[in-house]
Image (cartoon, grey):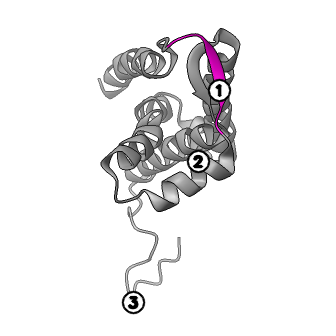
Amino acid sequence: MVRACCVVGLAWSLPLAGVATLTPEGTGWSWGDPLTELRWYATGLGSPSTMLELVGNLALLALPAAFAVRIWPPLGRRPVLIAVALAAGTSIETLQWVLAIGRVVSPVDALLNATGAVLAASWVTRSRDGRARTALPAVGTGDLR
């Protein structure tokens, strides 16, 4: 039952991510200079528009990654997960460039998308395995996972 729900969730979350990132906003494309973007994020954390952009980029692939890890547990292994998440984020930015749909092509966006995917999938993997959701072991248990 859980697997079926995850399949449906993945089937819905992937097209939503596609709509969010591949809906045309004009023609052509522009380059998102990484240093300029990082400075914008760092100086705009008090701005609602900056926070919306940051949270949106982190959340974009979080649900698909969480559902995918539940469907295919080997995907939850850290090296595989990081590689797939980076490939997914890079693919989105590459499609925005190739399709020339008026979007900003940004390596920072790709990294933020991948980071959100890895965090969400790691949380799902930990909770599924029954491990604590915190990085610190309980005091006095000798549990050093």
Describe the element under mark 2 as helix, strand or loop. helix
**Residue assigned mark 1:** 30
Is residue 110 shown above or below 93? below
Judging depth in this view, the residue of 19 and 62 nearest the camera is 19
Mark 2 or 1, nearer chain start: 1
Per the rendered image, the range of residues in magenta is 26-32
Which quadrant of the rendered structure holds the N terminus? top left
Q: Residues within 10 Å of mark 1 (few under 14, many from 20)?
A: some
Q: Nearer the viewer, residue 142 or 124?
A: 124
For disc 2, the marked residue is 37
**Mark 2 vs mark 3: which is more N-terminal?**
2
Q: Return the x and y of residue 18 as percentages of the image width and height.
A: 48, 17
Give the Cα distance between marks 2 and 3.
44 Å
Q: Residue at x 31, y 48 (%)?
A: 48
Q: In terms of secondary structure, where does tag 1 sit?
A: strand
Furthest-bottom residue in view?
140
Is residue 141 highlighted in magenta? no
Query: In the shown orientation, is residue 20 left or right of residue 108?
Result: left
Residue drawn at (64%, 37%) of the image? 32
Name the amino acid, label 2: Glu
Q: Which mark is residue 140?
A: 3
Where is residue 22? Give x, y as percent: 51, 15
Q: Name the kind of residue labelled 3 in the image.
A: Gly
Label 2 vs label 1: CA separation? 13 Å
Image location of residue 118, percent across then percent down: 54, 45
